[in-house]
Image (tube, rainbow, N blue to C red):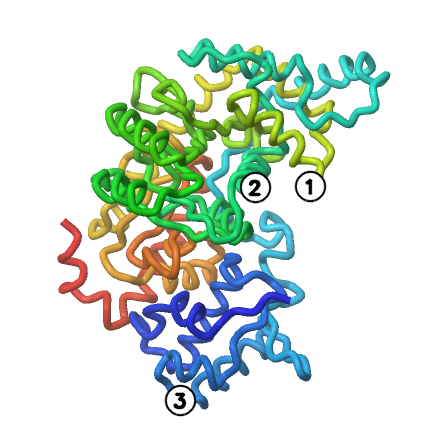
Amino acid sequence: MNSLSARSLASLVRGWREATAAPAYTALAGRIRLLILDGRIPLGTRVPAERDLAAQLGVSRTTVTASYGELRDAGFLDSLRGSGSIARLPSRSPITIDNHQSGYLDFSKAAIPAIPVLAEAALQAATELPAYLGDSGFDPIGLPVLRTAVADRYTARGLPTEPEQIMITLGAQHAIALLARTLLGRGDSALVESPSYPHAYEALKLTGARLVPVSVTSDEGWDESALEQALQRTSPAMGYFMPDFHNPTGQTMPPALRQRMLALAERQGTVIVADETMAELTIDRPDTPLPLAAYGAAVTIGSVGKTVWGGVRIGWIRAERQLIQKLTRARSAGDLGTPALEQLLVKNLLEQYDTILDSRRAQLRVGRDHLASALAVAFPQWRVPRPEGGLTTWVNLGAPVSSQLTLAARAEGLLLAAGPRFGIDGAFERFLRIPFGYSVEEMDRAVAALSVAWTSLSRGPLLDQSFLAEVV
């Protein structure tokens, strides 16, 4: 059973007393509840003892006792004799039931609806499957026909690639986890962006590595000086980056920085992993950015989860042959390969991928512009970037109330991922990630729910004009 220290929990709930007129124990319970709901406190984790947390937060033990009691009554904690209090979900939590049936509008995912031709492509794949049934079906590297198709696409994008440089995976998350297990060991340093994709943080932390964050903002992009210093001072074993339409900020790394980063990483012995799952979701740019590996030594992750549908769990790793062989040997500890039927499905989709992408880009352009306009009308005090691609915008709320707003929005039937979900140790309370891959009608409903939630927070002490004036 995993345990959460009082110090770690205190860091996660940083600012819990701000922007609320609720009693201290209720405010603390609300923040812990959100941490459980969005996965920052994994289910089954033992939370710290009341006395320890009270000392760390500088409050009375009575406050923490009352807070834990409120969470137990709501079904978010279980108290086990001799084991303390364990994080759980209520039996009918919104997370445990279908959000469409329950009336919840789920904007917590950077997702997009399935493409219309998906079912047709799946039927075609089924007709091709018999040709592969004579084999065992256990293949840790992937079908040659799909590896060739993926390699050919990289070559067409300006990065010459052979099929032997491709491994097919169970989506991008599987690729991240496999690379982390293979490249990192306990005590190693791993360079990461902050903010970034939270499940990448989780995969890297599971190896026992120490995360070294480098700032990325929606205004300035990557902190170049901090990035170079982190590489030089910590010599990380691995760096995880999303250089194209970064999740969540939407930024794209300039070519000159790509070259400098890869050259310095090679000198330091750091393997740079580029998550390029968003790379071809351009909106305003006339062309797709060159893959990071076109600028120097880098490992590339791709998938169809953000372009075709999240339910098609197919991704890939592009790397030098020696690393692909090493990954193939390491993979058997976790799984024995990728389903052949889904690989054939993706092979068929790649044959019409440019048409699929054109449709997606048009859809995302409409969604981004509509959401930005709706938010500007409803929340003129927010700063809403218009990214050149990707699926999300990283909104500056002007006050450190993201967690409180997320809880208030949940009460209005809208599920969101609070800003701190994308940071390390409770950062980014001033920010909220909002996806724009949904229909116009769904986005209008989301903005309406956000408006009600924001109004409920406007009575709090931090939403006065002195804070709103900081957004320029």
Q: Amino acid at mark 2?
A: Ala
> Where is mark 2, residue-wise?
177
In the image: residue 315, left or right of residue 235: right
Q: Nearer the viewer, mark 3 or mark 2?
A: 2
Marks 2/1 in contact by CB < 8 Å: the verdict is: yes
Residue on which the image places disc 1:
334
Residue at 63% across, 50% down: 98
Q: Which of the marked residues, 3 or 2, is nearer the chain's N terminus?
A: 3
Nearer-the-camera pick, 382 or 442 = 382
Horizontal side, residue 160 vs residue 396: left or right:
right
Mark linked to residue 60: 3
- Residue 356 visible in the snapshot: yes
Q: Which mark is residue 241?
A: none
Q: Residue at x 44, y 35 (%)?
A: 437
Q: In the image, what residue type sits under mark 3?
A: Ser
Which residue is at 61% across, 30% downward? 326
